[in-house]
Amino acid sequence: MNERQDYASTDLKRRPFRTTVMILSMTTVVAFTVFLFLFANTLLDVTRYVTGSGLRESLTVFYETFIWATLLLVLILGVVVFSSMISLEMVSRRKDIGLMKAIGTLMDTVFDHFMAQAVILLLVSVALGVSIGTLMYFGGILWLSSVVQGLRFDLSFPLIQIGFLVFVYLLAGYFAAQKPIYDAVHELPITTLNPQVGTRVRSAGYLDSFGLSFRIATKVTGRRIRGSRRTLLSLFLSIALASMLWVGGGIVHTTTGNYINQSMGTNVVAVGNPTVLSQYYQAYSLNGEPLDGNTTLVNSSYVIPTALIDEIAGLGYVTAVDQRLVECTRVQEGPGIVWNPTLQQWEHIGDDREGVALLIGIDWDHTISTWYYEGDRINATNQAWIGGQMANTLYEDPLVQTLRVKGASFEIRAVAFDIANGGMVAILPLSAMMSLWGVNGPNLLLVQVKQYTASAVSQIEEIAHQYGLDIYR
């Protein structure tokens, strides 16, 4: 440290309380920005892990957009507040600058002295902020790991990104501090020593009619508006950030809930064999493993009797009865033969890949579920929808290919956003599945009620037990 920097640091030590408060304030801004940036990267990893199967192209988009938008606002707000703090601190040194100029100190010496103070404050605050923010990040990781077991995320430290944050803060702080020092150095000593300079009352046109006191107030307010621009910007960004967290968070939460509720239905009591119920709802678990196909779900003993269906459908509080046939089995990618106008020849699309998928046969006229999908609706018994994960892993261009099941070929009409079995799912017409497996009824019944009450659930459960079946509530 040279003599000039040493004198600047000594001058800062001369006012320990003010210097400490300023360093703590700036350090807090940097620390929380670094923490949020690092923790947001972890949340992105968690988001990819949780939604990485099946809804990779749907839920992940909502979460990542929300996280990145919030992070961008936090970064901008942090830079604005940080630069405002160092700027206001240097503005408060105007009298010191005026005194030094009044005793004949050279302009360059005065400028370098206070810029050295600003640089010291910047370096100390950024260094402490990055250190504290990193410690907070590791503490947050430990907390997240203890609260949610089994999460996977990358612990690699983003040195380049943190270096970029440090550069942005130092650059913004440097120029924010330079402006008030430069302006004060180039003013007359009497101007910098007089805090009331520029408050002379002048004609204000229409505002003059409100009286002298109003003219003085508007003059002082107008003089301060220029110095309050960063404050107004900070306030605007704070409101924008709060709105993002409130509105954006609500949209993400509602959209996520809609994906699940619309595909599974609401106010639903499932009726079926315990094995079928267990496998079906395991497939809908966000934390569960995909089904392996080793358990047979379709056989004559699992078929739900027509008498049970009619009895439940006749209950006054039942609004819909959705009959389904579910099975987990091996499926194969069917080829697509398309004409290539550029090469003037037919091309074979697909590699005949195979995988295990959950097949759900539904009656499209009486289903309680709706899906977000890309493509067209099913209008024939030889057509099917497939889930997002199946489309990504088993197909090259699913909407021009087919799905092969037990020797039959189904035209793929759409890619549906369904979390069942991690997106390894296909939705087929109920009649087509019953024909392929040689059964005359469904093995799963989804009963939708007006109100999900204990009495309604108990009555449905009693009816199911009479036929040797169970319910899932």
Image (tube, rainbow, N blue to C red):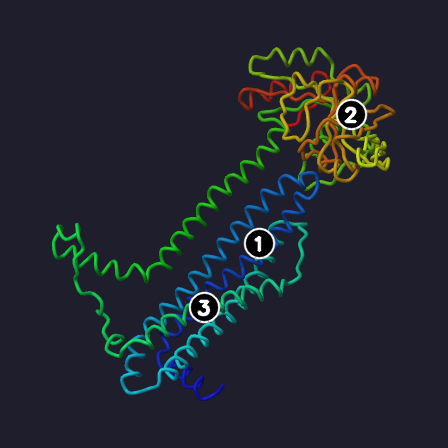
What amino acid is at disc 2? Glu
Residue 142: quarter of image = bottom right
Question: Residue 411, labelled with which disc?
Answer: 2
Q: Secondary structure at mark 3?
A: helix
Q: Are marks 3 and 2 in contact (CB under 8 Å)?
A: no
Quadrant where the C terminus is found in the figure: top right
- Gap in Å between the C-alphas at discs 2 and 1? 41 Å
Mark 3 and mark 1 lie on one chain; the one further toward the N terminus is 1
Query: Dots 3 and 1: beta carbons under 8 Å?
Result: no
Task: Please give the name of the residue rendered at 66% of the width and 30% of the height, measured from the top-left corner.
Answer: 373
Which is more foreground, mark 3 or mark 1? 3
Who comes first in sequence, dot 2 or dot 1?
A: 1
Q: Are marks 2 and 1 in contact (CB under 8 Å)?
A: no
Query: Left or right of 397: which side holds 270?
Result: left
- Could you say whether the residue bearing mark 1 is in a helix, strand or loop? helix
Quadrant in which residue 95 is drawn: bottom left
* Kind of residue at disc 3: Gly
Q: Mark on residue 40?
A: 1
Q: Is residue 325 above or below residue 342?
A: above
How many other residues sit within 10 Å of disc 1, few (<14), some (14-19) or many (≥20)?
some
Which is nearer the N-term, disc 3 or disc 2?
3
Q: Height in image: 205 above or below 81? A: above
Percent x, y of residue 245: 48, 46
Q: Which mark is residue 173?
A: 3
Residue at horizontal 56%, vertical 50%? 68
Q: Is residue 185 left or right of residue 142?
A: left
Q: Choose top left, top right, bottom left or bottom right for residue 229.
A: bottom left
Residue 111 horizontal/vertical position (percent): 38, 79
